[in-house]
Amino acid sequence: MKIYVISGLGADFKVLEKLEFSEQHSIVFVDWLIPEKNESFSDYVERMASVIDDSEPFYLLGYSFGGIMVQEINKIKPAEKIVIMGSIKSDKEKSRLIRMGEITKIPKMMPASFFNDKSTMFYSAVRKLFDPQNPKILQYFTVRDPYYLKWSIERISEWKFEENNNVIQILGDKDIVFPIKNSKPDYVIKGGTHLFPATKYREVSKILSSIFD
């Protein structure tokens, strides 16, 4: 069976490349698209979902923002199983920082230039939130289009979603981006920062193997 995989905000698949899957599954990585000007979230989700062949059963696996995306995709192309890593199952699980962005509308007011490569403030924040001890973190962060980054952060802060009991959640207990205290995950990665799919890949691979049996 095919497993469609979506990585995190701005991340390519290096952060997930060490994960191992059973040979019975075919892994299809879904690349992030650059949003069109004034594109709605629902229209963007439909474009992201266009690569998924729903004429046959499939699984969805999403990491971080990719976890939010696969839950949205599941509404229009239902999967046999939906697994999210380092992500949230509803807007009730948002961190205080994300909720503050939702209330204050700060992400919307930020200029796109804040997110370009010359702006050290944004990438410094990424390093501190994701895993300050990991020297490779910015190597994973390759989708750096400023409009895409600003648009995505706005969508995360605004996201509204009722929890789907069919979603399987894996969280790290040291995750700052999506703190475990706000959720009741199905699996907990001990010592896992937001980058746990890369740093705790053996443990994560075992969990995924048991889920996608």
Image (tube, rainbow, N blue to C red):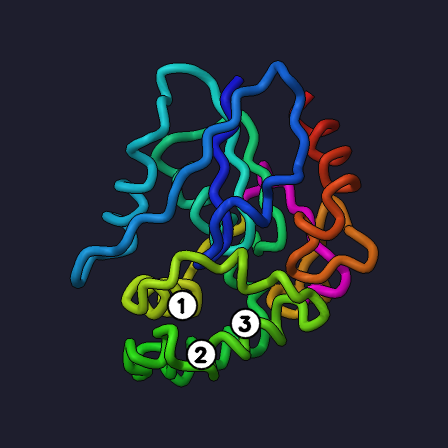
Nearest to the eye among marks 2 and 1: give it.
1
| Label number found at residue 153 | 1
Q: Which residue is mark 2?
A: 101
Q: Nearer the viewer, residue 70 or 136?
A: 136
121 on left or right of 150: right
Type of residue at label 1?
Ile
The image shows residue 159, relative to residue 95, as above or below, that is above
Where's residue 124, x and y in %? 54, 79
Disc on the earlier residue, 3 or 1: 3
Query: Which region of the structure is painted magenta?
Result: 164-175
Type of residue at label 3?
Val
Mark 2 vs mark 1, CA separation in Å: 9 Å
Which class describes the residues within 10 Å of circle 2: few (<14), some (14-19), or many (20+)?
A: some
Mark 3 vs mark 1, CA separation in Å: 12 Å
**Mark 2 touching mark 1, by CB under 8 A?**
yes
Decide whether residue 206 is among the magenta residues.
no
Type of residue at label 2?
Gly
| Label number found at residue 126 | 3
Residue at horizontal 78%, vertical 51%? Answer: 189
Which quarter of the rendering shows the C terminus? top right
Name the outermost residue toward the left. Answer: 37
Where's residue 1, x and y in %? 53, 17
Residue at horizontal 40%, vertical 85%? Answer: 104
Where's residue 190, x and y in %? 83, 55
Label 2: which secondary element: helix
The image shows residue 60, relative to residue 62, as above or below, that is above
Nearest to the eye among marks 2 and 3: give it.
3
Label 3: which secondary element: helix
Disc on the earlier residue, 2 or 3: 2
Which class describes the residues within 10 Å of circle 3: few (<14), some (14-19), or many (20+)?
A: some
